[in-house]
């Protein structure tokens, strides 16, 4: 491999290593291959086996009408490209197609391109997808040597994707509750900090819900901890279904019997309606005694622009009032008698009704 190609490979490796999210990784791979092969256009696609299709993750370079950098659902039947399905790491290969060819010729002509080179991307001994680079009509057709180099670039891309997937698994473990598969406290803290910043910058609505699964200790003591874990998993599924109504929301388990939901872009009233349904669903679980939920949002009369810590205190206090009064639905900080009581409690550390023990986690945030 000559020096220019070595430099191109090194640049591709560096670009992929510097990317954090999959769209960025995919763009770095496609753009690096386009530059290395002197193409006018490049794409990286992933093989979605359940659909039997190659889905385009990114298009780079000169785009024509109908092409998007990050398409929502541009895909092609993998049966039309058996070389992808049959690819193996022991025999990496790429192939060249021309605008006058039978398979991709019509598409190349329609896009004003004269030729392309396609190379399978293979991860962990399995075909993962395709790296594709094209040149405009009138440009030199890719040579067999360039096709071999495309196969090398596909292998380098596979290495970068493998590293990304390893790091992504580590990130998921760091931000995921192992029992329920929901986010964990670290994920909530990070999302809440971002949401508070967005609210302060542009006024985007923000709502935090804190939930406490009632009766977990009784279930553990009576039926064993495996039964308690099943209760938590089942409530986690209910919370996940609730979250689906709010794109971009985060459902999480804070620890023990406590869960949280962070919602942005939706008013408190919408979230309250969804959480009322969550409470009804939790009341119908075979084990446990329902759930106590507290809501704190930026749309209520809760005082100055919130910090993440204050929102947690408000939601905790509202949850405490819901639990203390056996409320069938959520308590919203600042709304109604219980909501106003929660507001006073959040603003007066240590405040609670005579004879009522403070919540352990609420006390811990004073």
Image (tube, rainbow, N blue to C red):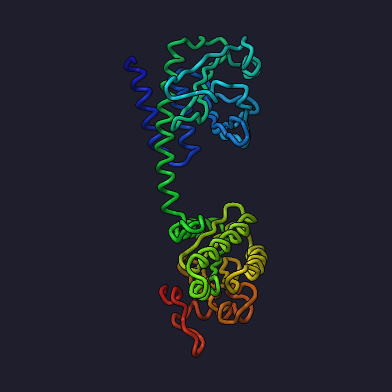
In the rendered image, residue 363, in percent from the top left (x then y), is placed at 43, 77
In the rendered image, residue 18, in percent from the top left (x then y), is placed at 39, 37
Q: Is residue 317 above or below residue 259?
A: below
Horizontal placement of 10 versus 205: left or right? left
Q: Residue furthest left?
A: 3
Q: Is residue 323 above or below residue 209?
A: below
The tally of labels here is 0
Q: Is residue 250 above or below residue 255?
A: above
Name the residue: 62% across, 81% down: 337
Image quadrant where residue 66 sits:
top right
Quarter of the rendering occupied by the C terminus: bottom left
Image quadrant where residue 107 sits:
top right
Can see residue 159?
yes
Horizontal placement of 103 versus 39: left or right? right
> Which is nearer the eye, 100 or 205?
100
In the rendered image, residue 116, in percent from the top left (x then y), is placed at 54, 16
Name the residue: 54% across, 56% down: 250
In the rendered image, residue 89, in percent from the top left (x then y), is placed at 43, 25
Horizontal placement of 72 versus 219: left or right? right
Can see residue 260?
no
Q: Residue furthest front?
A: 223
> Which is nearer the eye, 46 or 346?
46
> Which is nearer the eye, 282 or 76?
282
Quarter of the rendering occupied by the N terminus: top left
């Amino acid at each position: 491999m000559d020096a220019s190609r070595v430099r191109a490979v090194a640049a591709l490796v560096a670009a992929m290593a510097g990317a954090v999210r999959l769209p960025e990784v995919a763009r770095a791979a496609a753009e690096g291959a386009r530059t290395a092969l002197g193409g006018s256009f490049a794409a990286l696609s992933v093989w979605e086996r359940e659909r039997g299709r190659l889905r385009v993750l990114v298009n780079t370079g000169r785009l024509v009408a109908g092409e998007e950098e990050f398409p929502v659902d541009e895909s092609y039947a993998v049966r039309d490209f058996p070389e992808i399905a049959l690819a193996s790491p022991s025999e990496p290969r790429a192939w060249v197609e021309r605008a006058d060819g039978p398979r991709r010729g019509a598409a190349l002509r329609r896009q004003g391109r004269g030729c392309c080179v396609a190379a399978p991307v293979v991860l962990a001994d399995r075909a993962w997808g395709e790296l594709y680079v094209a040149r405009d009509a009138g440009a030199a057709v890719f040579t067999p040597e360039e096709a071999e180099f495309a196969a090398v670039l596909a292998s380098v891309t596979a290495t970068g994707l493998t590293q990304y997937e390893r790091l992504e698994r580590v990130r998921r473990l760091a931000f995921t509750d192992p029992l329920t598969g929901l986010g964990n406290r670290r994920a909530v803290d990070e999302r809440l900090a971002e949401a508070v910043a967005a609210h302060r910058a542009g006024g985007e609505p923000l709502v935090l819900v804190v939930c406490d699964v009632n009766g977990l200790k009784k279930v553990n003591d009576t039926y064993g901890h495996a039964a308690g874990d099943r209760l938590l998993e089942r409530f986690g599924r209910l919370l996940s279904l609730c979250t689906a109504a709010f794109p971009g929301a985060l459902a999480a388990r804070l620890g023990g019997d406590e869960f949280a939901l962070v919602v942005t872009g939706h008013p408190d009233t919408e979230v309250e309606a969804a959480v009322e349904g969550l409470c009804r669903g939790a009341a119908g679980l075979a084990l446990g005694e329902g759930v106590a939920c507290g809501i704190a949002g930026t749309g209520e009369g809760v005082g100055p622009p919130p910090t993440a810590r204050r929102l947690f205190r408000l939601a905790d206090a509202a949850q405490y009032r819901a639990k203390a009064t056996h409320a069938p639905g959520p308590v919203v900080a600042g709304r109604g008698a219980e909501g106003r009581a929660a507001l006073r409690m959040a603003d007066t550390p240590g405040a609670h009704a005579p004879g009522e023990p403070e919540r352990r986690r609420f006390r811990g945030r004073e």
